[in-house]
Image (cartoon, coloured by chain):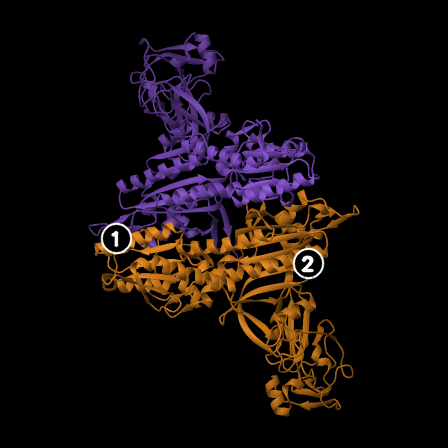
Chain colours: A orange, B purple
Amino acid sequence: MRYSESFIYTLKEDQKEAAIVSHNLLLRGGFILKLASGIYNYLPLGLRVIRKVSDIVREEMNKAGAQEILMAAIQPAELWKESGRWNDYGKELLRIKDRGDRDFVFGPTHEEVVTDIVRRFVKSYKQMPLNLYQIQTKFRDELRPRFGLMRGREFIMKDAYSFDKDEAGMDVSYEKMNIAYHNIFRRCGLAFRSVEADTGSIGGKDSEEFMVLSQTGEDEIVICDSCEYASNVERATSIVEDEPAQEIELKEVATPGKQTIKDVCEFLGSDPKFSAKALVYKNEKDEVFCFFVEGDDELNLIKAMRATGSVELEMVSDDELKKLGLEKGYIGPVNFPNKDVKVLCDERIKHRNNLVVGANEPNYHLMGAKFGRDFECDTADLRVVKEGELCPRCKKGTLKKIRGIEVGHIFKLGQKYSKAMNATFLDENGRSVPYYMGCYGIGIGRTAQAAIEQNHDEYGIIWPISIAPFEIEIVSLDTRNKELVEFCDILYEQMKKEGFDVLYDDRDERAGIKLNDMDLIGIPIRVIVGKKAFEKGEVEVSLRRDRQKQSVEKDEVLEKVKELRDMLYSEIEEGRDG
Amino acid sequence: MRYSESFIYTLKEDQKEAAIVSHNLLLRGGFILKLASGIYNYLPLGLRVIRKVSDIVREEMNKAGAQEILMAAIQPAELWKESGRWNDYGKELLRIKDRGDRDFVFGPTHEEVVTDIVRRFVKSYKQMPLNLYQIQTKFRDELRPRFGLMRGREFIMKDAYSFDKDEAGMDVSYEKMNIAYHNIFRRCGLAFRSVEADTGSIGGKDSEEFMVLSQTGEDEIVICDSCEYASNVERATSIVEDEPAQEIELKEVATPGKQTIKDVCEFLGSDPKFSAKALVYKNEKDEVFCFFVEGDDELNLIKAMRATGSVELEMVSDDELKKLGLEKGYIGPVNFPNKDVKVLCDERIKHRNNLVVGANEPNYHLMGAKFGRDFECDTADLRVVKEGELCPRCKKGTLKKIRGIEVGHIFKLGQKYSKAMNATFLDENGRSVPYYMGCYGIGIGRTAQAAIEQNHDEYGIIWPISIAPFEIEIVSLDTRNKELVEFCDILYEQMKKEGFDVLYDDRDERAGIKLNDMDLIGIPIRVIVGKKAFEKGEVEVSLRRDRQKQSVEKDEVLEKVKELRDMLYSEIEEGRDG
């Protein structure tokens, strides 16, 4: 494509609305344009990237035996009432009334619709396994849309749904998707990890997230330095050395004005890990919970939600604490004062012999509290694991935390939706059984943007060749030199003929502008035709990633470019460390 | 693709919801599945067709220099307020409130958004011409969705928008699209006509519709039997022989109980064409109009709307007539009794010397009424042209009416949107000028369905090869015969290798079921492998359109199929009469 005829407009200035580099570069490079909060238009360059990622996804999904369909974006509320999510989904679900005042939603996901499709046709176990997928625009009315395509409201997603006759079949379908996802993200040229993930409100058994590694990622990942263990911090566990400490007698001590763990422990000269701090939350049903974790631990909200069957947990205000009869800063598990509040301790609390805890009266704490002797309650894993702790899988390596951007998620749903929607088939014995389902998502736009977050420098984007808007850019630096222009024109036509995906910057602009735009847009292979070199019969070829120019004889350019392209693609095939 | 592994489920029974053949066949063939009124899911076969039509559209649009983008589906109301359509568009516009109670719409079309995009970047006449297009899901909340993809609420559309610096440039952009559209519909294998169309409420200058010819089409087209004139009946004009008749004196005659033109004329022994009938309508602003056309003419509502600047016209009820002081059945233009009602005559009324008209009192008519002598009012072309009338262009041929399905529409918008949205550029003289725009739509799903409406028989669909879900189907009729199966398997793999798009019916089903499904789904080239012929070393090859089987030696099948495929594609390239 000729740049002079293209709708490509770059911006010099950093964009205020962008809090992260990739968002800024997408805007500055003319890939996307904001229409409203969390809603973007894809301009020609952006759409080319979206299309390349989609094509890779499509190829790998087809290879894995999935079949492409396209479900409607606007869905009748009835299906969401059947599944129960009409009430459960909350404000992220964009609800719509049509002209006849009937309820609809703009689909944020398609479990209901796909289950409805399948139950109309699939009546026998012989018709499975089945995996249907689509690449489609979705809408989730995020409270705080941010980071461009990373957390938009309207976004393009690949969603797939598998249907099997039993759990073993579901496991096979899941594993096929796992492999397909590895292929997809490798082919997109990304360094990524698949990590264990919480199944959250979607429910189900196993779940893995695919994380593009990046220091600016919103997700924290826990990895082992010696085995393959990798988990979202939301779900990660660890083995912590047991230090039960000396058992002593329970005694009350005055701690006037000391409300925080730090203050109390300093005052008493004790180690925060031998204390229990209280955190009081209420859930969407207004049930109140008091969680105790060790003084130097952090409450893992996702684990707390799972332990309490909650969809949302919100911290209780000081006023509410008072009404509940709880003394802020002095709450403790011994003689807990309110029976309507459910008390839950982290499992590690159980193993301590000697804890500093609140005395449930102002300005007093207890020392030497011991689970089982002085208090009892339900326990669960409620803490966030820490770096340096022991790996729960190999039990040898130590854990490390890195950050990542979630670009894919695979789930074993089991029978959650098929049961709710009475979507059944007849098994070998003629019995009616709900399907065993899996669901598998990839954020197409987010994948594209994550690639930038992982691959850029101070000059702009460095696209992996497989998802770059173009593979090659020719820049002619002297548009008044007839011979030079003719050479570029012919080279451009030759490259197109050879099947290269090429952008030809033939604009009548200053060299500086063209070279800056080239770096910003980030096309991986560049051919720069300048006057001086051209007169010597040479042009400059370089890769975007190192910007190292090589002089190449004019009639060897095509060969050189082919060689570089093959090299870049074979590097991608080999994969990158994740 | 192997049929046994495909999500293809055909239905034996005609579908009640389908009022036209193509809709029934799309449902029965497992191409689409209804989710709600006017909202459909595309199943694998249906999506394949949609994709093939889209690819043809994309290639021709790119060839014409247009650039693909993808605009957001959800658009902020502010833009629609800027253009004025927030108020004008009516109930077809799906209005949405987000969680922050802000107004949005699900885009039914994208003039506002694209104008907003372009005004941010295009500031100089040097940056034009520009043509941006997208292929996208739209929503129009039709009052009566019907005929499947023909008039759905959620539908896939290609919409393009051109921007030029002046009217001459706009004309060139429009003409490029005109050519592209001819290429697109020819390559889709359709018999079609481009016809003059009314510009309707979108406004603008010229407009042409692309009509797929079909007796079940919703649109009536007027064509000349001797020249290229073709027009939507909404806009068509004609030359009608002038028969002024003898001028006589005006006189009142009793016509007791005779209210219809037919009754009155029979009673008086006069020719209906020498009478004027009254039609009373009110528009969206509650303005009332009385239209007079000749007794044997039909009022053309679209022309009436244009003549009165109305967006909607609704017939006035009998009660309302009374309140207006108008006598139903006896309304006439002489001494018209209500000055608040605007009277408009068809132009032909002006040329008559002698008309039977209502006397504006019950049971009386006037004979001999003459425009200019007995009454005067504004005139306009208000009638529907009739078959057999003289062509307005060549003035020699006679007009004929045929029916069509509108699959594309091109418009010169002029400065309607750019003026309203203050979207301007600087021209050669540094003056600020609103862009000259055109807009160009193609209904992707409607095109696919129109192809069926035009190409089917009593057994099912007959797809044009260029948009068929597959080009070739192999049917093995004996799945227990090892040699036969092996032959089919190898043939299937060979065909895939050769780049054929092939469906292989390897199901363990009765021959009758497989052959019926094959006819229903309508893949253009078929290879049937039956036991008897196979044992003689032969297979049967046929085209879907004539179902004439040809015996072909086993090892010549591939060659034969190639030959047929090339033949079908070259037929399409030659085009079909429209």
Q: Quadrant of the C terminus of chain B?
A: top left
In this view, A524 is above or below A424: below
The disc placed on residue A486 is: 1
The disc placed on residue A336 is: none
Left/right of residue B240 with respect to residue B486 in the rendered view: left
Report which residue position mark 2 lands on. Answer: A171
Q: Amino acid at mark 1?
A: Glu
User: Mark 2 belongs to which subunit?
Assistant: A
In this view, B530 is above or below A238: above
Nearer the observer, B375 or B284 = B284
In this view, B388 is above or below A225: above
In this view, B92 is above or below B331: below
Q: Residues within 10 Å of mark 2 (few under 14, many from 20)?
A: some
Left/right of residue A189 with respect to residue A380 in the rendered view: left
Nearer the observer, A316 or A169 = A169
Q: Is residue B148 visible?
A: no
Question: Looking at the picture, how far across and down is residue A450, in whole percent?
Answer: 48, 64
User: Mark 1 belongs to which subunit?
Assistant: A
Q: Nearer the viewer, mark 1 or mark 2?
A: 1
Q: Quadrant of the N terminus of chain B?
A: top right
Q: Residue at x 61, y 64 (%)?
A: A208
Q: Amino acid at mark 2?
A: Asp
- SS of the residue under disc 1: helix
Left/right of residue B26 with respect to residue B185 in the rendered view: right
